[in-house]
Each structure stands twice: as C-alpha cells, then as structure tokens.
C-alpha cells in the first residue's frame, strides 16, 4: 500500500528545489568557512567525548558521531 | 511510555511491509529531491593525522589510553582512513565495589573507512571492531552527504549495522578466562537523517535525527538487582530496545572573530527513558596561532520503566534493572580547550599542525540510585575529570 | 487511487528531468560581451579587462578560504605557463573583503599570473558569481564563451581544450 502523505511531501520538495536562489552569495562565505565555525573541528576528540557520555548515560544518537561499536553495557 | 514517541517509533519501525515501505518512500523522496537540483561539487575531508592521549578519572574508575587516526587521499576522488583506540580501565567503581571485586581491563578498537566523492555526493563506508575480554563488537557504517541549494544546504543519510558478542570472565587461580558456559549476542541498527542549513553569512544550523534499534542480550551479565530484603538477583532486560533522538545545533559567528555554539537534543526510547541534553560553547581565536574555547553541558534523564533502586520481592516484574545509567539523574560538564598552531606557513609536506589540550569536569547526581557503601544509604553522585592531549597534522 | 498514480508519475518525471539535466555545471554562453572592469593587481598596477582584447582571457574567481579554489590554482598556473606565449592570459580575482589571507597564501604557493583584488565585490556581482570557484573563459573579441561553476578534478583538461579552440579562432 502506498501512502499519499510521503508522496506529496517528496513531490513538493522535488518541485521547490528547482527555483530557489541562494541568499548567501558564495563569495560571502568567508566567515562560515572559518575553522572555528566548524561543527567538528577535531573529530578524534569529539568522538572520544561522545563515547564517554554514551557509556554513562541512557541516551544515544544524534550526537554527531556515527562510527564504532563500543561494547558499552 | 510517551505516546507520541511510541507512535513515531511504530510509524517508522513497524516490522510489517508497510512500515518498511514508508521508510523507503521517505528516503526515495529525499534522493529524488537531490537529483532535481543544480549541484556544485562537494569536497573530500582533509587529509590529517591525529594522535591523542585520553585520561578519565572519577567515580572510582580510571580509564586512559591512546587514540590514533590517519587519512590519506588516493587519486582525486577517494580518501582512506584508519583509526586505533584503546581504553585501559582500572576500576573500583560503585558497581564493582558493591557487587564484585576490583578489576582492570583493556578494550581495543580499530576501524577503517573509505570516502568517495563524485560531484553529486560524498559516500563513505567504514568497518569497526572493538574487543575486550568479555565483549566483542563489530559494526559497519554507510553514510551519504549531498550539497544542494547552491551549497547552502547539505543533506546527510546514514545506516549502521552492529553485531555484539557478550561473554563473562571468570577468575580461576589468578587467571581471568572466559566462562565457556556463557555466550550471548546482540544486533544493532542505526538510521540517521540530517540537514545542515546555512541561514546567513554568520549562522549555520544542523538538524539531526537518529533511530537506533537493538535486539538480543542487552544487559550487563555481572550486574544484579537488589531487593528490600537484601537479596540479589541477576538483571533481566527486554530483548529489544528502540530509541529516537533528534538534535538541533547552531554555530554563530560574532561580529569579531569568535563563534558561539549551541545544541539541544531530545531523546525518547521504548524503555521509557526521556532525556534532554543542552550544550553551549564559545570559541575565541587569539592572534594567528591560538584558539581557546569553553563549553557547558547539561544532561538529564528519567528512569527506565523497569528500573528500580530496590525491588519488592513480593511484587514480581517481567524486567528488572539496577544499572545507574537507566536511573533518573542529571549531569553537568564544564570544559575548556586550548589549541596552538605550530606550523603556520607550512613545513615540508605539512600544511598545518596543532597541539591541543582539553579538560572537562563532570558531575553526575542520581535521584534514585543509592550509594550502598555506607551504613545509611544516600543518593549517589560523583565527579570526574577528563583530560585530552593531542596533536593534529594536516598534509 | 488516481491521485496517487498521478503523483507518482509526476514524481518520476521530475526525477528523470533532474537526473538528466544536472550533469553539466558548465554553461555555453554563446557570445555575451564580458562586463568590463578595472581592478588593482598584486603587482600594484591596475588591470582593465578591455585592454586585453585580442587575447583569450580566463577570469577565475577564488578565495583563500575555498579549498577547491586553492586546489585549482596550481593547475591554472600550468595552463597559464603553457599558453601565455600564444596570446592567452589568466586573471585570478580574489573575492575577499580582506585580502590579507589571500596574500599570505600566495607567498606560499606562488603563481605567475596576475591576481586581482575585488574587495568590494563589484566585479563578482557584475559577473553574477554563483559558485566558488567560477571560471569564465573570454574570447579574443571580449565575449564570454564558457562559464564553469565549481572545480571538479579533471576540469582543467576541458579548460585546455576550450582555450586551444579559442586561440585558433
């Protein structure tokens, strides 16, 4: 059975994409390209800290990490 | 359990054909959207080498070890990377003190990955293996990222599959060996969706969603639950665990060269745990070579349905847990980090190099997990310090 | 049921259109006169585009924070060295408000073609730069013949083919 809702959403997204113009010009991107604006400047350090938290807390996921099976039980 | 998260979990993960088709349509829709837009080239991650030493001390546990990571570009479209990580654990923690004896253990993890860039997308595949004497975890991960809307939007999708093998160690005559009579396993799957959106020339935001489902033996084989009459019994966990997490984070560039960071994550799972995580940070470069930063993180969760500090021996339960990770608690972290770029102009084949120090101070306070070590049990709490010292090289 | 079928068909058409048309990031502009400009160069002199008429010119818009731009620079340098004696020139336009980072980078990776500084983004706007980097190829009569958006490894071969063709005209 194919549901209508995901279909409509998908179609709208497809159609809308073709006409939008970028509102931040590519040559205005200097600040965004600055390393201090990166979400993950030091991946080896953030993946370690995510592991420290995940091993001690009940919550997991949506934390920027994706790799490693840690065996934390 | 929260009604909304229950129905959301059911919507996406229902084992019926219908549920899978819904997920497939959502992914198909996003892929089609990607196809119809004007595309610009994305970039492979930078080639770098990182060597880190980590040290954790708190709650009676010390965990330390190295972490090494290196990546190399091959040709113009592919990047390979490898990682090695060790946790050397020495523990006299509360779990251990009240139900077992002091132990030390070592966990080693290795992973390799390949990232492929084609002007339409970045695809990556990785494999990871983690081993300690009573736990082996293997996992594989697949991720796609796609730039769209004149590079203002990036879409992310990912899938991971993991296989765990759980054992028990026995101490016999001074040696630690695996108990041949105990071997269990667990399977894990993760589904990730994310979108990174540039809002203005100073602001970029990320929205991420992750669904994790686990099946199999999910508890710690050594841990016990306690009853009001003082008796104990091994924990009994459900053999499935499904969770949803959604997070929103933002980076804002201040009028002078510095950045503010903020993030919030909401978590809800099929065990009845709801958790909220807030993090705010500030990064400040100084001159050309120094970057200093600080952050504060607050985490809180309520306990799992089948968690109790003490169980009533006359009120039998299907599932019972006394793992403090499943209790009601909150944690706070204050962290500071310092980075020094010692290769400003490039040196031989190195473009950039940094020396880094990061210190985090954490405090965990439990609402319904008791410290049973004293005559009058009180609510348990502990502090920990986490230190990281590392060097990064770009080439 | 009919609505669902129509939607699915519409979706498939959009997808097909998308997949078929997105391959090219280059535009064959078919003789649009290149907007004239005068910018200060790294040698201190001002360079005016219309004074270069008679030569094939590549105008490359770049920035020090744009890594594909930096990857492309040594390849542009090779192109410049090869064809400059035959009546070709290359102008590297730095689009940054503050040129100090670009100047610092150029001290490390020296290029021999002129670098122009468009600190007020006047030329960038005039050329409707919509991607970084953008490479505009202009013929001997001062008309824009090709525009390349972004940098993909291997595109320098296309630049070479196009420059050679324009040199022969």
Image (cartoon, rainbow, N blue to C red):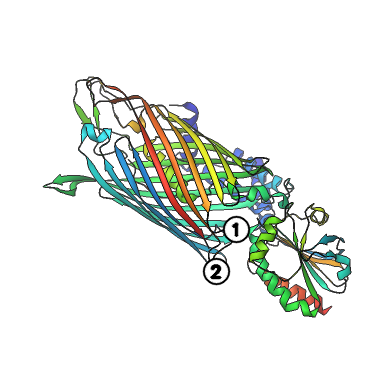
Q: Which label is found at residue C46? A: none
Q: Residue at x 74, y 54 (%)?
A: C130
Circle 2 packing at 10 Å, graded few (<14), some (14-19), many (20+), is few
At 78% across and 80% down in the image, what residue appears?
C85
Tell me the CA gap for discs 1 and 2. 13 Å
Q: Position of residue B176 (x, y in %)?
A: 18, 48
Inspect this view and state whether residue B15 appears. no
- Indicate the quadrant containing the N terminus of chain B: top left, top right, bottom left or bottom right: top left
Pointer 1 local density, CA inside 10 Å: few below 14, some 14–19, many at least 20: some
**Residue linked to disc 1:** B43
Q: Is residue B348 left or right of residue C20?
A: left
Chain ID at mark 2: B
Q: Which residue is mark 2?
A: B75
Can you tell which quarter of the image residue B104 is in? top left
Left or right: B182, with A50 as reference point: left
Provide residue B87's location: percent of width, then percent of height.
Answer: 33, 48
**How many numbered markers are drawn?**
2
Q: Position of residue B170 (x, y in %)?
A: 17, 45
Instruction: Indicate the quadrant where residue B16 lies.
Output: top left
Between C13 and B71, the one nearer to me in the picture: B71
For the residue pair A71 and C2, the one nearer the viewer reads as A71
Chain where mark 1 sits: B
Q: Visible in this render: residue B289?
A: yes
Residue C111 in the image: above or below residue C69: below
**Circle 2 sits in a helix, a strand or a loop, which is it?**
loop
Q: Is residue B144 above or below residue B280?
A: below
Q: Residue at x 69, y 71 (%)?
A: C77
């Amino acid at each position: 059975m194919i549901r209508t809702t995901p279909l409509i959403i998908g179609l709208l997204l497809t159609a809308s994409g073709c006409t939008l113009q970028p509102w931040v010009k590519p040559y205005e991107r200097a600040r965004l390209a600055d390393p201090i604006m990166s979400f993950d400047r030091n991946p080896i350090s953030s993946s370690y800290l995510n592991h420290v938290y995940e091993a001690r807390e009940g919550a997991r996921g949506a934390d920027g990490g994706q790799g490693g099976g840690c065996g934390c039980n | 359990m929260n009604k909304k998260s229950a129905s959301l979990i059911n919507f996406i993960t229902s084992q019926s054909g219908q549920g899978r088709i819904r997920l497939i349509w959502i992914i198909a829709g996003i892929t089609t959207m990607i196809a119809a837009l004007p595309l610009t080239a994305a970039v492979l991650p930078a080639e770098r080498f990182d060597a880190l030493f980590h040290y954790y001390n708190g709650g009676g546990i010390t965990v330390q070890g190295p972490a090494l990571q290196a990546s190399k570009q091959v040709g113009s479209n592919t990047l390979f990377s490898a990682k090695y990580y060790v946790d050397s654990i020495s523990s006299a923690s509360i779990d251990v003190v009240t139900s077992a004896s002091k132990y030390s253990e070592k966990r080693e993890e290795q992973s390799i990955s390949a990232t492929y860039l084609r002007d339409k997308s970045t695809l990556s595949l990785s494999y990871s293996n983690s081993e300690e004497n009573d736990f082996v975890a293997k996992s594989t991960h697949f991720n796609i990222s796609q730039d769209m809307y004149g590079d203002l939007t990036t879409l992310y999708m990912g899938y991971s599959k993991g296989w765990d093998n759980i054992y028990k160690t026995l101490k016999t005559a001074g040696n630690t060996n695996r108990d041949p009579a105990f071997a269990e396993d667990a399977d894990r799957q993760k589904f990730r969706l994310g979108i990174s959106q540039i809002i203005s020339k100073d602001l970029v935001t990320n929205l991420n969603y992750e669904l994790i489902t686990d099946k199999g033996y999910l508890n710690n084989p050594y841990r016990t639950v306690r009853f009001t009459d003082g008796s104990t019994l091994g924990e009994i966990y459900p053999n499935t665990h499904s969770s949803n997490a959604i997070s929103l984070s933002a980076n804002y560039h201040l009028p002078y060269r510095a950045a503010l960071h903020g993030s919030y994550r909401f978590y809800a799972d099929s065990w009845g745990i709801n958790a909220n995580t807030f993090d705010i940070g500030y990064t400040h470069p100084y001159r050309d070579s120094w970057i200093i930063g600080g952050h504060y993180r607050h985490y809180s969760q309520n306990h799992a349905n089948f968690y109790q500090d003490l169980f009533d021996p006359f009120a039998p339960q299907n599932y019972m847990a006394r793992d403090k990770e499943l209790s009601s608690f909150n944690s706070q972290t204050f962290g500071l980090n310092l980075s020094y770029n010692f290769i400003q102009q490039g040196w031989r084949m190195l473009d950039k190099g940094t020396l880094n120090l990061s210190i985090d101070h954490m405090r965990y306070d439990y609402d319904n997990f008791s410290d049973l070590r004293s005559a009058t049990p009180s609510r348990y709490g502990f502090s920990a310090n986490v230190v990281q010292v590392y060097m990064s090289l770009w080439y | 049921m009919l609505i669902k079928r129509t939607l699915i068909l519409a979706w498939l058409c959009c997808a097909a259109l998308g997949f078929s048309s997105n391959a090219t990031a280059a535009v064959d502009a078919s003789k649009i006169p290149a907007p004239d400009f005068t910018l200060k160069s790294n040698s201190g002199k001002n360079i005016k585009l219309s004074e270069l008429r008679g030569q094939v010119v590549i105008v490359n818009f770049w920035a020090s924070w744009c890594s594909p731009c930096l990857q492309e620079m040594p390849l542009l340098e090779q192109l410049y060295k090869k064809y400059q004696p035959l009546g070709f020139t290359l102008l590297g336009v730095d689009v940054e408000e503050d040129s100090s980072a670009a100047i610092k980078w150029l001290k490390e990776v020296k290029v021999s073609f002129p670098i122009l500084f468009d600190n007020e983004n006047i030329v960038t706007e005039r050329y409707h730069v919509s991607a970084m980097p953008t490479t505009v190829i202009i013929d001997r009569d001062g008309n824009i013949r090709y525009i390349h958006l972004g940098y993909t490894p291997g595109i320098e071969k296309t630049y070479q083919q196009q420059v050679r063709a324009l040199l022969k005209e």
